[in-house]
Amino acid sequence: MATATATRPPRAAISGDTFTGTGTLVRFMLRRDRIRLPAWAVGFAAFAGYVISAIPLAYGTEEELGSVVSLFGDPVGRMLTGPGYGFTEPTFARLVANGYGLYFVILAALMNILLVNRHTRVEEQAGRSELIRAAVVGRAAQLTAALIVAIITNLVIAVAVIVPMLGAGYEASGSVLFGVAIAAGGLSFAGLTALTAQITEYSRAAAGIAGAVLGAAFVVRAGGDMAAEGGSALSWFSPLAWPQQTAPFVLDRWWPLILSLGLAVLSTAAGYALSARRDVGASFLSARPGPAEAASWLRSPLAFALRLQRASLIGWGAGLMASGLVFGAYTDALLHAFEDLPDIFADIFGSAEQIVAGYLGYMAVFMALLVGVFAVLAVQSLRAEETSERMDPVLATPVSRVAWLGSYLVVTAVGAVVLLVATGAVNGIGAAIVTGDTTHIRDLTLAHLNQAPAVLVVLGIAALLFGVLPRAIAATWVIIGYGLIASTFGPLLDLPDWAYNLSPFEHPARMPLESFDAPPVLVLIVVAAVTAAVGLVGFRLRNVNVS
Amino acid sequence: MSTAISTAALTKSFGQTRALDGLDLQVNTGEVHGFLGPNGAGKTTTLRILLGLLRADSGRAELLGGDPWGDAVSLHRRLAFVPGDVELWPNLTGGEVIDLFARLRGGHNKARRDELIERFDLDPTKKGRTYSKGNRQKVALIAALASDVELLLLDEPTAGLDPLMEAVFQDCIREARETGITVLLSSHILAQVEVLADRISIIRAGRIVESGTLAELRHLTRTTITAEISRPADPLENLPGVHNLTATNGQIRFEVDGNQLDPTVRELAALGVRSLTAHPPTLEELLLRHYGDELATRTGNTRGNA
């Protein structure tokens, strides 16, 4: 036996041994995620329950839905929510599934990206995989176990969404289809992440590439869905569109999910193929040697803060400007889409110019929210500098705490403003190219710059938490999440003024629809400065990296 | 002789855990001071207080004549620090990190830097995430040793270095002492401290339990004697200060307290000594005495009884 084992050709890539230990690893991963996965399931159930119960409360009866639903069905609404099935004869169930479904799928995609990355490349980068692989564990067991956990989790969130829908008395066929569509959409991103985790050695890059695919999928389907009701050919190039094309409670068709599952299977297969051809911890994008000496400009805390955030700034800049250009270029499609609508829509929404100005104004807020995400992530990575003990040696040099945190915040703040201005300019260029109206470039650059103080408030609050209550930095995400809900769904939910005022992004004027208004912008700048200052003082007074 | 570091009754708690419990540490200017203790004894906490990263709950700490918390920035111009677990930035090369730290500290001696890179055999063009643990440690060591400072705070600086590099490290510390640099060397590698340190402080459960030169510490402990004798060993058995006597076929072995050495050797001489070896306590034995009760409860034997 021993001889037989020893002489077995080592290139038998797929054998029974390849998957040895998968079952144990599945249980191990479920054990590690015993808080996280139920929390996601509860989150999905709560989101579904909230939408299901809030809509009847806000709109009364299904008969009254007609005027509201046209907001979802118009081109801008479709850009933000999906192809707009079923809005000609709206029901509560149709509005839930086809008006809000996109956001369920986006959440599921994020959950899957984080889940698969957490159990594959994060483990490898931390060196924990070697411990696992040194045990009686097959070559493909970890990846397989991660995907099985992803399948289990997606099934659980499908049930978590289906149950409240059935509880509300929605049709069973549509409810089940909606839940399964979310799970299938999530799985396509689990597969993509299984692939990206093989490509790069660096877990943040693996999640980043998958996240970039998600962002591109959103942009592509936004344009496709805006162009025509029910989506256009462009929509079908987006993995986010397929779950929505099932049109639950309207067409109730299952076959678009073949595309979602097909993508999951193909990308997973590619992931396995790459995984079998590489070493543990290695990748296909290997690290190149760098300079033996630091560049001469790298000599101050400010320069160091810039060096640390440079890659992130470049990545965000590229992603935001690409999206800005595409969203700007959609302006023309928007105008054409409105030409096809009956005149009555112009009475409700105003002239085509106003629609475009409203759309571009919303774009400025949307981009500012994304730059807010950049700002929160920047402060979170500074916190990671601290908890990974990289900050100790920096603070052991003659760099004061205020100088270090201050330098970092200055780079983030200036970076955020530059990102907004660049995105606004490119957004304007995109709009100018398709409409031939070059004033868009100046208008949109200013409209985006006008939102910068709101981003700075987010940064200031994150800095305050970093200085005073560093473990609670993640609470800053509430501002981003609330800001997105208020700006996107506020008009649909008929929010009162005070509820709008809670979001810093609602305070600057909606340029270019409205004209510039200085006082709110100045107030936001003061709030940002004060919160950041409190954060600086707090950081000076607290212990560094005490868990 | 002036004092580079002094702490008095320093305490620091993290929640329920008392990390420092009245720590009194004295480090003289120009000496290499070994700071010995097992994991979790409070070595790193002490160093982080001395760096002004943590604020002590009570007690007094003085570093180079200043307050480690209040004067952190000006003091940091005069010291360099090497953490025990060096984490580097994934996308910065080792060379970039060395230069960056030197520049943040204000001074930059290029020749010294290049010489150290050569001696420690470091490839400065690799990115932080591709270095092994030992190589990350080298990056931090070179950054510290290349800077022009009065005080080196080293927290288990050679964890992960191979024996060749350990020797290079020891040479560098000796050179540093020759130029008058004070070194606080926290370690649990006894051989390293034994070779390098002028004075030693042993920390245990947040307090200094022993402090002095190696010679002074040895005085406090027992010498182990092995001898071959021609007469029965009975007269030794009841001598004060003799412990763990074993005798088989004229071969005897026992331990004797430092202050009882003279009368014991006189008694031994009368027994017809044919061969004799005596060795002073190693640091292992010193430490075992201090952690003996811990070991005893952990392993169930009484080897370290005092």
Image (cartoon, coloured by chain):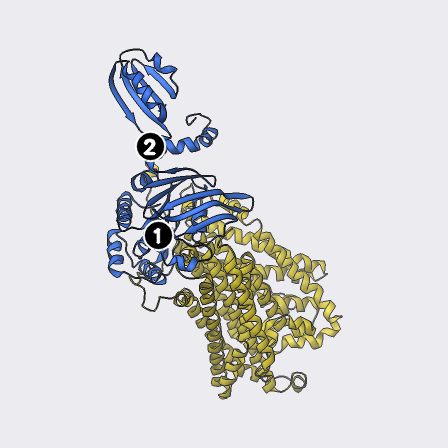
Chain colours: A yellow, B blue
Q: Is residue B256 above or below residue A76?
A: above
Q: Secondary structure at mark 2?
A: loop
Quadrant where the image shows the N terminus of chain A: top left
Residue B163 to residue A426: above or below: above
Give the tally of numbered discs: 2
Q: Which residue is mark 2?
A: B282
10 Å neighbourhood of mark 1: few (<14), some, or many (≥20)? many
Look at label 2 and name its amino acid.
Thr
- Residue A243: x and y in percent read 57, 65
| Chain that bears disc 1 | B
* Mark 2 neighbour density, 10 Å: few (under 14) some (14–19) many (20 or more): some
Left or right: B179, with A422 as reference point = left
Which label's residue is closer to the chain start, 2 or 1? Answer: 1
Q: Which residue is mark 1?
A: B151
Circle 2 or circle 1, nearest the eye: 1
Residue B257 appears in the figure = no
Closer-to-camera residue (B93/A239): B93
Q: Say whether mark 1 and mark 2 are on the same chain.
A: yes
Amino acid at circle 1: Leu
Query: Residue B241 lies in what quarter of the image?
Result: top left
In percent of width and height, residue B25 lies at: 42, 44
Query: Disc 2 versus disc 1: distance between alpha carbons?
Result: 28 Å
